[in-house]
């Protein structure tokens, strides 16, 4: 009888550990503002991870496609009910700041944060912090769409490399430490190294991009960037790889 609370806590911890391990297999998502709106970027294996929710709302996620679809459907229903009961202009991420770009991140346990300028989703808080710090250091006052995509892909590469490093560290835990081990863990790779990593990954995957374009005509501001358009926006070192 007295073991029941312990078993419940242990079960929750086991589920959290399982989810954390599953997220390490996922692809980070990067969102940042540019001079024309908001850019969302990820690298997927085929299943879309970026979605339109409503006129000025977009969703990017990590995790199982079924779970993302459930979340997307719930948000779609809420947004359309809000738009029907009130007006489409009332359907915003935050009604109090309608004219400001708002980025919201939500974890699987329900915790959420509001950010401006940039936001990322990653497997662990440490990787997420690393990516966010890089974005904030590199972001200019205003970015063009091409510059924003370049920066977003480099930030994605930092997250991807960090995931790989975490896996390597776990495999090396049982081995005795060597001199200088971990000395380069905090080093930020060069831009060329980051783009080279993306180039190596993208050959078997798809660079997925979408924007909320505030200059787009009509009420819907969401636009998925098609492969033909994407090839002209990518850094030159990635254009040939994306074409394949």
Image (cartoon, rainbow, N blue to C red):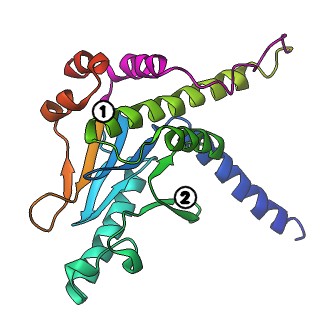
Q: Quadrant of residue 96?
A: bottom left
Q: Position of residue 16 (x, y in %)?
A: 66, 52
Q: Nearer the viewer, residue 137 or 158?
A: 137
Q: Nearer the viewer, residue 210 or 3?
A: 210
Helix, strand or loop at label 2? It is loop
Looking at the image, is 190 positioned above or below residue 8?
Answer: above
Instruction: Report the residue at 43% width, 47% height from top.
Output: 64
Q: Nearer the viewer, residue 91 or 217?
A: 217
Instruction: Report the residue at 35% width, 32% height from top.
Output: 150
* Sequence order check, earlier mark of 1 and 2: 2
| Mark 1 to mark 2 CA distance (whole Å) | 24 Å
Looking at the image, is 62 positioned above or below residue 208?
Answer: below
Q: Quadrant of residue 137?
A: top right
Q: Position of residue 32 (x, y in %)?
A: 39, 48
Q: Count residues near mark 1 (Cα–Cα under 10 Å), then give few for <14, some for 14-19, many for 20+.
A: many
The label on residue 108 is 2
> Which residue lies most toward the right here?
2
Instruction: Report the residue at 13% width, 57% height from top.
Output: 216
Instruction: Report the residue at 51% width, 60% height from top.
Output: 106
Q: Position of residue 221 (x, y in %)?
A: 19, 60
Marks 1 and 2 in Cβ contact (< 8 Å): no
Looking at the image, is 145 positioned above or below residue 110?
Answer: above
The label on residue 207 is 1
> Which residue lies most toward the left here?
217
Helix, strand or loop at label 1? It is strand
């Amino acid at each position: 009888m007295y073991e029941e609370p312990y078993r419940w806590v242990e079960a929750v911890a086991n589920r959290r550990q399982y989810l954390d391990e599953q997220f390490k297999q996922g692809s980070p998502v990067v969102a940042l503002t540019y001079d024309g709106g908001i850019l969302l970027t990820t690298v997927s294996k085929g299943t879309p991870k970026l979605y339109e929710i409503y006129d000025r709302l977009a969703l990017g996620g990590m995790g199982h496609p079924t779970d993302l679809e459930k979340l997307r459907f719930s948000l779609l229903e809420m947004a359309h009910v809000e738009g029907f009961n009130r007006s489409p202009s009332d359907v915003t991420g935050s009604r109090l700041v309608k004219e400001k770009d708002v980025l919201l991140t939500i974890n699987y346990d329900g915790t959420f944060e509001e950010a401006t300028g940039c936001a990322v989703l990653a497997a662990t808080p440490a990787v997420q912090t690393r990516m966010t710090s890089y974005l904030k250091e590199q972001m200019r006052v205003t970015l063009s769409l091409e510059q924003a995509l370049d920066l977003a892909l480099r930030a994605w590469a930092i997250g991807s490399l960090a995931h790989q490093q975490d896996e390597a560290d776990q495999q090396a835990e049982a081995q005795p430490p060597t001199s200088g081990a971990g000395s380069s863990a905090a080093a930020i790779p060069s831009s060329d190294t980051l783009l080279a990593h993306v180039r190596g990954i993208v050959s078997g995957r798809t660079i997925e991009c979408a924007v909320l374009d505030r200059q787009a005509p009509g009420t819907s501001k969401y636009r998925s960037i098609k492969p033909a358009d994407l090839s002209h926006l990518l850094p030159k070192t990635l254009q040939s790889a994306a074409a394949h």
